[in-house]
Image (cartoon, grey):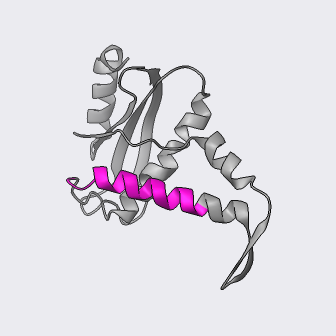
Amino acid sequence: MNKIVLYSEIPDLNAYTNVGRSSGSVRTNKGKMPLGVILQSNLKKKTETEICKELLPVPVLDLIGKQYFLIVFYEKNLKKDDDNIKFKKKFIFDSFQTAGVLSNDTRKKVCTLFECVFVNKNEPRIEIYFSLDKKELLDFYLSNFFDLI
């Protein structure tokens, strides 16, 4: 089993949605585009760039087979809802593709078995555990659950 720890600040669903609510439009070479769409695109690119910097030592995963994931989010406090926090995995898996770690994040290549959200005000981070063997990941989760908290 492998582990990656991300310390990048990744926007949650509320932050991403709020950026998209910006009113107005911008003229581009493709015509007029809503400002919110452009800002969301820029936020996504910036976030992926930050995550990719942390993924540099990670090997290419999907050459071997389907990967199973356990993602543990450690947040600063309890202010955000779990579902909004878990949206961050969209940026994570897209960054895996951008960095060349995964060729695609379809369900044929990726299966997220567990997602947990805990509080660690001193060290907010995201721990990503992955394995080709879903039983190994399940055993790890069940035997280490209280250590993850």
In the rendered structure, the answer to whether residue 10 lies left or right of residue 140 reads: right
User: At 70% across and 54% down in the image, what residue appears?
Assistant: 20
Residues rendered magenta in the picture: 41-57
Name of the residue lying farthest toward the right? 24
* Residue 34 at x, y percent in the picture: 75, 67
Where, by quadrant of the figure, is residue 71 drawn? top left
Q: Magenta part mainly helix, strand or loop?
A: helix
User: At 39% across and 64% down in the image, what residue appears?
Assistant: 98
Where, by quadrant of the figure, is residue 145 drawn? top left
* The one of 77 and 67 positioned closer to us in this rendering: 77
* Residue 128 at x, y percent in the picture: 34, 39
User: At 42% across and 20% down in the image, what residue appears?
Assistant: 121
Residue 78 drawn above or below residue 1: above
In the rendered structure, the answer to whether residue 107 lies left or right of residue 14 reads: left
Total labels: the figure holds 0
Residue 136 drawn above or below residue 42: above
Visible residue check, residue 67: yes
In the rendered structure, the answer to whether residue 72 lies left or right of residue 21 reads: left
User: At 67% across and 51% down in the image, what residue appears?
Assistant: 19
Name of the residue lying farthest toward the top? 146
* Residue 11 at x, y percent in the picture: 54, 44
Visible residue check, residue 109: no
